[in-house]
């Protein structure tokens, strides 16, 4: 199964948190928001995730590569 996560917004309602960090990487209880989403999809049996990324895409991709290495 495949899933699409829309993570391209600016996160204006979460400012000032999103001025330097993309919304999916904001920490909540020592985990990023995107980590919670990925874990939920994994439990649901999703094997392939597609991320629609725009704002601060490089920072998000670097964080996801670090997460994948864990």
Image: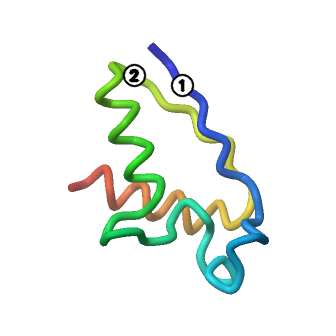
In what quadrant of the picture does the N terminus appear?
A: top left
Check residue 3 in the rendering and tell me which mark sits there, or answer none.
1
- State the residue at coordinates (47%, 58%): 33
In what quadrant of the picture does the C terminus appear?
A: bottom left
- Residue 26 shown left or right of residue 67 in the figure: right
Please rate how many residues cluster around mark 2, counting C-alpha atoms within 10 Å: few if below 14, some from 14 to 19, many from 20.
some
Across and down, in percent, residue 14 comes to: 68, 73
Do tag 1 and tag 2 residues touch (Cβ < 8 Å)? yes
- State the residue at coordinates (66%, 77%): 18
Residue that badge 2 annotates: 46
- Real-space Cα distance between discs 1 and 2? 7 Å
Does 5 sit above or below residue 27? above
Across and down, in percent, residue 27 comes to: 43, 71
* Residue at the farthest top position: 1
Does 46 sit above or below residue 59? above
- Residue 38 shown left or right of residue 17 in the figure: left
Across and down, in percent, residue 26 comes to: 51, 70
Check residue 44 in the rendering and tell me which mark sits there, or answer none.
none
Does 2 sit above or below residue 14? above
Please rate how many residues cluster around mark 1, counting C-alpha atoms within 10 Å: few if below 14, some from 14 to 19, many from 20.
few
Asked which quadrant contains residue 10, the reply is bottom right
Q: Earlier in the sequence, mark 1 or mark 2?
A: 1
Residue nearer the viewer, 60 or 5: 5
- State the residue at coordinates (30%, 71%): 30
């Amino acid at each position: 199964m495949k899933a699409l996560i829309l993570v391209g917004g600016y996160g204006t309602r979460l400012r000032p948190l999103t001025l330097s960090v993309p919304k999916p990487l904001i920490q909540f209880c020592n985990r990023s928001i995107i980590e919670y989403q990925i874990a939920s999809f994994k439990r649901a049996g999703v094997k392939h995730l597609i991320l629609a990324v725009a704002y601060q895409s490089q920072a998000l991709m670097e964080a996801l590569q670090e997460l994948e290495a864990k």
